[in-house]
Amino acid sequence: MLRELAVQNLALIEDVRVELRPGFCAWTGETGAGKSLLLGALGLLLGERGSADLIRTGADELRVTGRFELSRPEQRALAAEVLQAPIDDEDLILTRRLSRSGRSSALVNDVPVAVATLRRIGEMLVDVHGQRESYSLLQPAYQLDLLDAFGKLTEPRKRYAAAAERVRELRRQHRTLDEARQTRQRELSLVRFEREDLDAAKLQPGELPALGKERETLVHAQSLAQFTGTVAARLADDDGAVVDVVSRLVKEANRWAALDPKLAEVASRLEALKPEVEDLAETARDLSERFEADPDRLEEVEGRIGTLKKLQARYGKTPDELIAYRATLDARESELQKQEDDLAGIDEALAAAFAELRDAAAVLSKGRAKVAKKLVADTQKHLADLGMPLAKLDATLEPVPLDDVPAAGADHLDLMLCANPGEPARPLRKVASGGELSRTMLALKTVLAAHDPVRTLVVFDEIDANVGGRLGDVLGQKLASLGATHQVLCVTHLPQVASYAAHQWTIRKSSTGKKTATTINELTGEDARVEELALMLRGESRSETTRKEAAEMLRAANQLRVG
């Protein structure tokens, strides 16, 4: 609901602020006073195009601010979705500015937004019907939403929506897996090759350093054998070897020990040295025999080292790192193979989900076909009441291919109007006459009033075009009825229509010196409303009789509206 509208520097409007109320609100006043300007201001606030030509002479900027009350959770949820931000309270304050330079800016709750965002919020909150672009009900998608709500098709719609989301999700998964399929298959082949390659290598921890040491030993085997043989010979095997020398020294030390006891210690230590020398000679002898040149083993070792070096260069990892890497390949192969299997499984799941989607769409379409007839029949009765007895409203449901998974099912709805016999039926959005369109919208809104929890503000301009007093009375009753569930803002020239309003404002144009300005004032008392209705009936020539007629009109309308 629009609680407040403030307009500064828009054409004849210098500074106007109006507080609006629930129910049927009528704006009245003489032609040219600025009623259309105020509706134009509301249009700017809701994202319509603006021009610097609209700015009041002498001003640099025009500004429009509107305070909307989002009393229903559905409204707050949709507003939060549009703004991509939570709505903390029930007030939503929209602001639109236009400058002389042509710059346009928009704010929602003091946060800068694109003008397109205002338009989306406007389409969400308000239905505008008149000379400017009409919202919501002229959009086939929204007509379909209301048709489903009118026909209590919520559950079939939910089933279809769930099936559609399932198909979309499976398609997303399929697309992701399919797009990566070639890469995945190449990787799978590589994983299998690497696994076989590394398994064939039969890598062992610490193998390369050990082979390097063995290679060095084999390369120098002859020199090592010669060295250790020489050690054994000089220690024990040759004439005059260290063992013989030590033996002679032991004997001499023992002979001289009688002269000095310390020489006995020398003899003892020399005796202890002899087994160590003999053992060292034996060790050197054994090593000399082991360090035997083995060309075949050397070739084998060098070949193995070459193999390991090639693997290291190929993979960019040491042999020990390759052992750890090989341990990961089985899990990676399983993962890739699962993705391949998933793709095949998704094909099957997708076929089943699409069959469910098709069934859900068929149930929904069948329900819509039945409900559409009732909607048209109910609306047709109101059209007759609204002075369009020969008009014919029809609802055409055209099939929509399911291949692209449409959001609302397999149907495209167009409400078609043939306003006069002999004329072709046209979609509502292409009906030329603003008055006919507005009355058709009123008829539809009357039928659908209880089924739209979001767009609770309905604006009518030109609804009483080419309408006389008798029909104006019917229009007033319909608007008052709609006002029971919606906030209705109607610009009208007919006193019969205005008399049914729960609240009424008068719009005047006044001149002071060289300035002309538009003002709007609420008529808060019965006398004020009677005077305005009398002015609408007879203009400046109104009389006491006119006032009595206006008072009776207001009394009768109040009785019908309340009772």
Image (tube, rainbow, N blue to C red):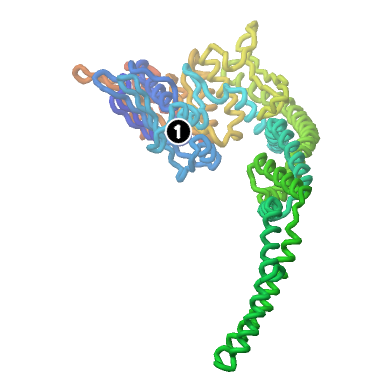
In the shown orientation, is residue 251 left or right of residue 33?
Answer: right
Q: Nearer the viewer, residue 420 or 127?
A: 127
Residue at image coords 38%, 21%: 35
Mark 1 highlights which residue? Answer: 502
Q: Nearer the viewer, residue 409 or 332?
A: 332
Type of amino acid under label 1: Ala
Q: Position of residue 63 (x, y in %)?
A: 33, 27
Provide the secondary structure element on which disc 1 rests: loop
Residue at image coords 49%, 19%: 133
In the shown orientation, is residue 192 left or right of residue 83?
Answer: right
Q: Position of residue 476 (x, y in %)?
A: 50, 25
Q: What is the residue that sits farthest to the left in this orientation?
A: 513
Q: Position of residue 152 (x, y in %)?
A: 69, 35
Residue at image coords 33%, 16%: 53
The reply to whether residue 533 is in sight is no
In the shown orientation, is residue 18 left or right of residue 201?
Answer: left
- Tally of marks: 1
Give the quarter of the image for residue 529: top left
Give the quarter of the image for residue 89: top left
Sort mark 1 into few (<14), some (14-19) or many (20+) by Cα contacts within 10 Å. many
Q: Position of residue 248 (x, y in %)?
A: 65, 80
Note whether 226 is above or below 16 in the view shown: below
The reply to whether residue 212 is in sight is yes
Residue at image coords 41%, 24%: 44
Q: Nearer the viewer, residue 339 or 420?
A: 339
Note whether 86 is above or below 66 in the view shown: below
In the shown orientation, is residue 52 left or right of residue 419?
Answer: left
Note whether 134 is above or below 65 in the view shown: above
